[in-house]
Image (spheres, rainbow, N blue to C red):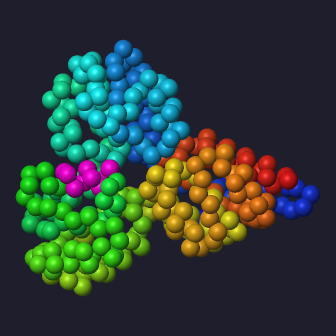
Amino acid sequence: MLKFTQRQVNSSFMKKIIKKANLAGFCYGVKRAIDLTTKIKQDNPQKNVYILGELIHNNQVIENLKNLGIKVIYDIEDIVEPQNSICIIRTHGATPEDINKIQSKGCEILDATCVDVKKVQEKAKSLIQEGYKLIIIGKNNHPEVIGIKAHAEENQTGKALVLSCAKDVEEYIEEIKSAKKIGIVIQTTQKTENLQNILAEVAKYAKELKVYNTICPTTSNRQKEAKNLAQEVELMIVVGSKTSANTSHLAEILSNITPTIHIETEDEIDNFEKQIIEAKSIGVTAGASTPEYIINNVIKKIEMKGDI
């Protein structure tokens, strides 16, 4: 049986129970990336330190890194004095083309790609090399998926399809039907249900099917724990960036179980004051890129509402 961190807030009207998920907050990949990034700047104070894209999807963390003198860039041409610079590859990874461009400028690279994302890149590449028609399940415009697709297609031995939902199968039905064999990988932060739904459709037409379930174990466990918690409370609060895939999926999953609020910081609590005051039990979880202090600030703000 799962146990959650529990607090009880007393007021003259009621006793409010707040339960915090144990798996809320930074995953090991995010923590590793932040630790690497801050250390590289501390060790190289005189060098320009860049991140190609946002290191993780959290505005507060990105702002903290900028305050340390670390610059977020979206164009490699923005690297100034490359011989005196370090460019960090974000947790979501980068395309081989971008990595080669950075190296060709003479800029040092620090690779903070999540190890689980690296595994998906390798699996995707191996499937194409083995002659499989590759399908990547995930968001087409997400940086992780863009990187996975680019690594798989690097040697131009095959092209990959990206499916975000079961309905997308219809768009590529002829390619799927004509493929001798199909290989599938999945974006690390996707929902298990989405994998199952797309597999069910692809399996109708595939002659041979090989599937690597590359959903991050931490993501899966976080979702399972949050679903169990949602069944015990009247209201769930999910804390994390609106642009974070794993956080948005958490909110989506939980909203099918109990009323759910998705916020980025404690500043948004006031927008949901009525729901929070009326709920006798509240569960709190957070995405993999949400700092612990933000989660704690949210809980403190909820406790204040319990005293109204």
Task: Point out residue 114 in the picture as x, y percentages from the top left corner.
Answer: 34, 46
Q: Main secondary structure of the magenta part?
A: helix
| Location of residue 266 in the rendering, given as x and y in whole percent from the top left corner | 66, 46
Task: Report whether residue 112 is seen.
Answer: no
Q: In the drawing, does residue 31 fall left or right of residue 16?
A: left
State left or right for residue 206 relative to residue 306. left
Q: Which residues are magenta?
A: 143-151
Q: Quadrant of residue 167?
A: bottom left
Residue under the image location 18 percent in, 66 percent down: 134
Q: Is residue 19 something one can see in this rendering?
A: yes
Q: Tally the marks.
A: 0
Identify the residue shown where x is 24% and y is 74%: 171
Is residue 146 rendered magenta in the image?
yes
Q: Quadrant of residue 279?
A: bottom right
Residue lying farthest top? 46
**Residue 143 image offset from top left, x and y in percent:** 32, 50
Residue 210 position (above or below residue 96): below
| Residue 192 colored in magenta in the image | no
Asked if residue 204 is positioned above or below residue 156 in the image, the reply reads below
Pick the residue in front: 226 or 177. 177
In the current view of this chain or complex, which residue is farthest to the right? 12
Q: Is residue 95 left or right of residue 273?
A: left
Position of the N terminus, as image quadrant, is bottom right
Residue at 64% x, 69% y: name it: 259
Which residue is found at the position 39% from the left and 17% from the top? Answer: 45
